[in-house]
Amino acid sequence: MVTPSRGAIEVALAKALPAIEIAAPGRAELSDATEAHGLAGHADALALPRNAEEVAAVLAWCYEHDVPLTPRGGGTGFAGGAVPLDGGVVLDLRNLNRVRSLEPALWRAEVEAGVTTAEVQRRARENGLLFAPDPGAAEQSQIGGNIATNAGGPHTFKYGSTGAWVTGLEVVLAPGEIVRLGGAVRKDVAGYDLRSLLVGSEGTLGIVTAAWLRLIPAPERTYPVLALYPDARTGTAAVRAILAAGVEASAIEYLDNATMALAGGACPADVDATGTFAVLAEVDGEEAAALRARGELLEALSDARETYAPTAPDRIRALWRWRAGIPYAVQAPRGGKLSEDIVVPLDRLQEAIDGTLQIGARHGLTACSWGHAGDGNLHATMLLDPSDRAEIARAVSAATDLFELAVGLGGSISGEHGLGTVKSGQLGVQWDTQALELHEGVKWLFDPKGLLNPGTKRAGSRRQPPTGKKARPEEESAPPS
């Protein structure tokens, strides 16, 4: 079967699958929230399936005609994983947006991939339950994308990343088969854990079309504490003090001095937060237990310069809204930023924070960081002018240094955003050769033609399969047969 020419793919796909909406991709379908890397996506057609069967039909057509396929959700990722770099078809899952079931008495739900994070959280909350993953952009981010990246967020510290809430998957695998793994069961060790393998695979092994999610009773109260310190040394010591005191925090965040210099003025706290090192921690639970934990948290943070511990729900919401807006406040003065989600052991957090500033200075860039301190997860950030190509190039070079910094401290090049396209080929900084070969072998076992999100999550620079596997043929300009 020859590959349709670039101009013929949209026409041929629409003719072959008339029941599915096929269109020309617009600018929105060729990008995600990745900044500063200058990604210029291009694709030949946009498919908007309405169910798993239509997803399977699109994948089957692409596999038959050797056409690359890039699945996408809300486009809120920060690693370019939803950006089609090899042309082909963009598979947009926005129309798979049904909550198939919600069973509050059994603490579970089954939802399709296009349901937003906010919708799942709202449905759970209305029934006295909690879906804890909170990776941000909740009104736009979709469950399928969150699963594909194993998205995290501030409350990952206590409750785990998205994968910890997934008990089963419906997924479309090459060359176009619908497979179900797990389900409404809470325990399943019958075979290899293929569900966990697909969680975080960034659309390179299969396309998630639905998921069974576990829910838990919502905590009765939440109590945050914002503590301010003079520098990273004292601030990171406070983070360790929370753990040493045995406080079961639901979130432990940090914002370094450079971040607070840019964003501290908008902080809703009744303190002068500008230019300080901030630790934002929270406890939750049943009223009496949460109050007790709040007291323990305040004690652990008692050496802070100042603390702010709101109890009114509206003030608590305002504090977390401010935290959610940090990325926008930080980039406002320059107009852009490059931010990498490196992660290090908790006892090396100060070194990573200081190292980020040093790397920025070395490349002539203003640097700052903030992130999920309890997990050792930094959003190490270089500020830049998005129209300055030279500055962007320096920031990309600085990102490579950040990866080496993280690995040198015993950490990882990605704590929650994944490799996407912007970090493809960088896994060799972290893994040895045998691990890289296993990684590549899994890819080609699931996707022997290399058509699923082909520019994403590569272990090395190699774009061909290991010896013995069949690579997809070079694109031909002949019309579809």
Image (spheres, grey):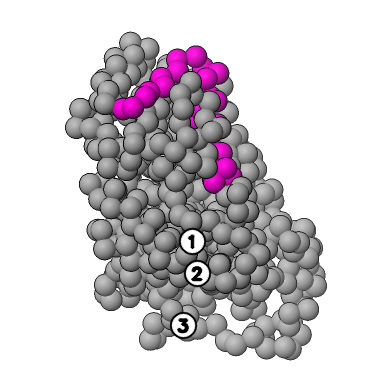
Q: Residue at x 29, y 69 (%)?
A: 431
Nearer the camera: disc 2 or disc 1:
1
Residue 156 visible somewhere in the drawing = no
The 10 Å Cα crowd at callout 3, few under 14, some 14 to 19, many 20 or more, is some
Q: Disc 1 designates what residue?
A: 365
Residue 319 shown in magenta: yes
| Region of the chain picked out in magenta, as a range | 304-330
Vertical arrangement, residue 456 with respect to residue 473, above or below: above
Vertical arrangement, residue 120 with respect to residue 73, above or below: above
> Could you tell which of marks 2 and 1 lies nearer the N-terminus?
1
Q: Position of residue 171 (x, y in %)?
A: 52, 55
> Could you tell which of marks 3 and 2 lies nearer the N-terminus?
2
Q: Are marks 2 and 1 in contact (CB under 8 Å)?
A: yes
Q: Residue at x 25, y 50 (%)?
A: 348
> Could you tell which of marks 3 and 1 lies nearer the N-terminus?
1
Q: Disc 3 designates what residue?
A: 464
Q: For the residue marked with disc 2, what is the amino acid? A: Arg
Nearer the camera: disc 3 or disc 1:
1
Q: For the residue marked with disc 1, what is the amino acid? A: Leu
Q: Disc 2 designates what residue?
A: 394
